[in-house]
Image (cartoon, coloured by chain):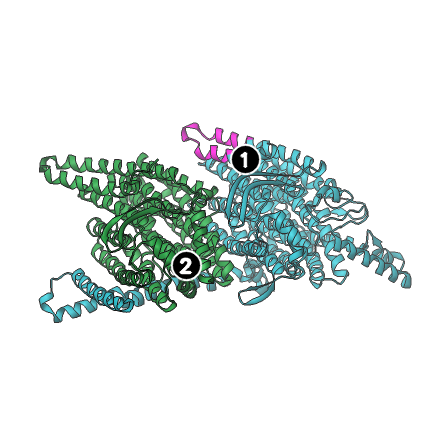
Chain colours: A cyan, B green
Amino acid sequence: MLYLLIVFAPLAGFIFAGLANKRMGDTPPMVVTTGLLFLSATLSWVALIKVGFGHEPSDLTLLRWMDVGGVQANWALKIDTLTAVMLVVINTVSALVHLYSWGYMDEDKSKPRFFAYLSLFTFAMLMLVTSDNFVQMFFGWEGVGLASYLLIGYYFKKPSANAAAIKAFVTNRVGDVGLALGVMTIFLIFGSVEFDTVFAAVEANQDKVVNFLGMQIGAIELIAFLLFIGAMGKSAQFVLHVWLPDAMEGPTPVSALIHAATMVTAGVFLVCRCYPIYEMAPVTSGFITAMGAFTAFFAATVGLVQNDIKRVIAYSTCSQLGYMFFAAGVGAYNAAMFHLFTHAFFKALLFLCAGSVIHALHHEQDMRKMGGIRKKVPFTYGAMILGTLAITGVGIPILGFGFAGFFSKDAIIEAAYAVGAAGDSSAAVFAFWMGIIAALFTSFYSWRLIFMTFHGNYRGDQHTFDHAHESPKNMLVPLGVLSFGAVFAGAFFYKHFMGDNAYGFWNYSLPVEDTHHAQVIPDNLYAAAETVASDAGHHGDDHAPSGLFGFLFAKFHGYPVWVLFAPLLVSAMGFVTAWVMYIRQGAEKHIAAVDESGGGVMYNFLLNKWYVDEIYDATIVRGARALGDVFWKVGDQKIIDGLGPNGFAAMAMGVSKRFSKLQSGKLFHYAFIMLTGIALILGFVFSKLGG
Amino acid sequence: MFSNLPILSFITFIPAFVAVLLMVFSRLTADSGRAQLEKNASWVALITTIFVLFLSVLLLIDFDSSSAAYQFVEDTEWLGGGINYRMGVDGISILFVVLTAVLMPFCIYASQTSIKKRMLEYMVAFLILETFMIGAFVALDLILFYVFFEAVLIPMFIIIGVWGGKNRVYASYKFFLYTLLGSVLLLAAILWLYNYSGTVLGAPTTSIETLSRDLKIPGGAQTWLWLAFFASFAVKMPMWPVHTWLPDAHVEAPTAGSVILAAILLKLGGYGFIRFSLPMFPDASMLLAPLVFWMSIIAVIYTSLVAYRQKDIKKLIAYSSVAHMGFVTMGIFTVNLQGLQGALFQMISHGFISGALFLLVGVIYDRMHTREIAAYGGLVKQMPIYAIFFMFFTMANVGLPGTSGFVGEFWTLLGAFKVNPWIAFGAALGMILSAMYALHLYREVIFGEVTNDKLNDIQDMTGREIIILAPLALFTLILGVYPSLVTDITGPSVEALLASFQQAVGG
């Protein structure tokens, strides 16, 4: 009952708001959807306590869905700790975003529609995470895609919003095809699409080889790879990332909910949910590691130079998702989930703060036209500082004190280091360094955003500045709650997600070893860390370095101290660089410099997102159009119709001119006579054949 | 309930009977009473189709879905020489009977407002059409089937030719030419079969049941026969490259004509493959399955891309129909459970979805008298309810899970994947392309700014239009969430078909 309420309350809200009568006014749909979401959110925390701490997972079958020749899939609610964590993330952020939208969408003319979409999204997302089989997950997977499409295109009059919405849906579909093929391969190999059955049989099938598109591939590797294609689409990993920045055309609360905290993390969830498959697919895991690491780096470089406040955060999201993936790739699934969890709070916070700024400045999103507004919006400013401290991972290693991102991001970087140092995976080494570099960039662009927006002198239109105002309370309360999460979520949950309590907490929903010693605990990782520790210990005996050098290479929980401090160090470097450029030198100087010189090759390369969109447009988009035209105008009209019916008609006409006696002026007659003739002849031939 | 009644004959011929009555009345009525008669005719037709629907629902209730055998069988001497009047339904055909019966009242109801001339004749044509369609699905005799199957063309031809748009003559000519060409070959093959059954089985017969069960045809002849049947069914589906009649026919047909064309007529081809090609020519089906696969994949990709470039709303939807039928043919010739069930499901689901899409086009066509995509834009402002329906069916057409469109697509892909991943991969590209063209259409028609001034005071859907489309949306949703409604009925028949197919091929 508890779980039914959690999942179906948002659906009820969607239906109510969707059917709401105009005469009813805007308030009832808003109250109902928001109220139900808060109910759902509260119950989700109850669920997390029950499942995560009380160890009571459950699997509830609602209705038979599909049942043809072994494709058995039910509508079901499977609640284990992994799901419970997602429930908390989804419903908490969703409830806060619903509330926030009261203020942000105040002047909007179709509020019930907006709230209906938000609730629909939440429901689809809940179906995705509560599924006990791949098909229902696919339902949720595409359902969130639909809601995302509707919300990106919410301002339907704007051509750019429509284009972005379609781009998001179609790009996601590319990933979905991968996912669908993955599910089919699963069915082919395991004869089932249910998680429990499939995961139990992974080990027994690990040597199976299938022929896929002419290649002989290990079945498990293939499944892992195809599922990851789906994850790449939904979670905007490089190659399929192009839709996410454009998705910022949607209203800002949407960006916070869908394109930061929840939907885009579905890919990470998928990989974690399928860990039994990925554990047996080292090649694909390596690919995920490399892909995640590269995306973390790539998106961070693009984020460095963007001027639209939302786009900076969008690329930041893309980059942070890369972190989560390479964590999962190196086997640190709990670190990936931990970062997903903390990221939801601080990234939603950052987006909602950006929304508050945009709201204050009459929908201005260009940071070049902002500056110095911290006194106008002090609360937003404070909250955004907290969010930035969280994303840049500020905290003190060893003492175990810091903001949310500090715990989770460092856990990821350490995990990559450990696997890389153990020599198991060169992808992990790559990921470690990419992670460090991306952390430097993250710090830079995050502080650049703060400085360009809140510090220095105001650079926009004076009238807007005069009317700038702090947002209403219904927007500030969510900021407050999320700030709380951004500050404390890491410190409080570290023990459960990563630390001593992790084994009991995850309760087999993720691979965590039963130990009270290791910090990052997936089995292979733990082993790796131990190896590093013992190797280095041996090493230490020979040289016995002392002083600062000795301190840096000393081990703490199995990691060299320099590894623990590296993220913090680069974060500080990023902050200092941003401070020098945008506070000391001032944003004006850099804006003017770019205006004058055009920015140079590198700047434009980054500003134009490595020209990926342009390449896609020139090849795929134009290619599809050209092919469509050729098939239509040449294939259908010239060849098929030309040789077929039209040619036939012409021929019939020609024949008819010669037999002018038969000419009755109507095309049908000829056709009919000819065909009757053919029929008679063929009938005769066939009857001879048969006889 | 119907053990002593020729219920199938009732269901089949009631519409035709009423049609004849209408024509008689029309002769007897003086010109002064003409207008009233036209109006009454449409209501009589509506009541008739609802009555047929009622009967077919009773039929469905009485149908024993645990059995694979033909039920409600009627078998009486007809033309002699083993050609009997045989009727009956199994789990496969009963679905199409119900689909036809469900859609007819909607078509009639929708036509009441949109048809402006010769209402009585129009209703007569539709009623006769219903008789022929149901007859084709329930016939258990090849000749009887052939008669219905070909006769369907006549009322459809008239509907396009009389109530169609500007280019109706060209369209109906093309339609007629293509389908006739196919049917000629079909007839020749049927005659050959009749002849052959006489020499092999002792007495000649055209009983579908006997022919499928007992007649073993040598491989070479099977191939020729298969090709002859294929020519006819492939045109009806329509499969690439004999699909070009469909867009023209759709564009010119009146709304209800398009609905019937897309929802039911096309299914005759798929039904034919399942009912005849697989059981009668199993070896040839195995041999030529790759041909069908490639034609299906080409259909999916090629026509989806063509659909993307269309300027006419109806043409776009027509091309999308061809692409969706590609999934059906692919599914059928995988000859495995998922593929066949998927193909059947896809046919039923497409019946509702494409029917609804053509009705939706009809809604704005009745107001604006144009199907040009460019003439629309920003409709959501004036027509929010319409926008919701259009979005729902667009998503169903795209195959969003939760709608019936997903289930058929997914199962046929699954079936194809078992046979050859390449096929599934090729067809899966259709999932991306369908999103491209469907969302493109939606954006151009519904979203954006209102650019055409005439759209500023366009009316949203009327109560009548909502009554027509809401049930279709409900069906689409229910079948998407609980597809067992269909598969429980088709299950035993499909399994029996597969079993005998495997036996024939294996042994």
Task: Report the predominant secondary structure element of the magenta stretch.
Answer: helix
Give coordinates of residue B325: x percent, y percent. 38, 55
Give residue B324's quadrant in the image: bottom left
Count of numbered tags: 2
Q: Is residue A355 left or right of residue B373?
A: right
Q: Position of residue A88 (x, y in %)?
A: 63, 38
Q: Residues within 10 Å of mark 2 (few under 14, many from 20)?
A: many
Is residue A524 depicted above or below A152 in this figure? below
Residue at 39% in and 60% down = B299
The residue that label 1 is drawn on is A8
Q: Nearer the viewer, residue B407 or A46?
A: B407
Q: Subunit of mark 2? A: B
Give the residue pinned by disc 2.
B300
Amino acid type at circle 2 is Val
Range of magenta residues: A12-35
Q: Position of residue A531 (x, y in %)?
A: 81, 58
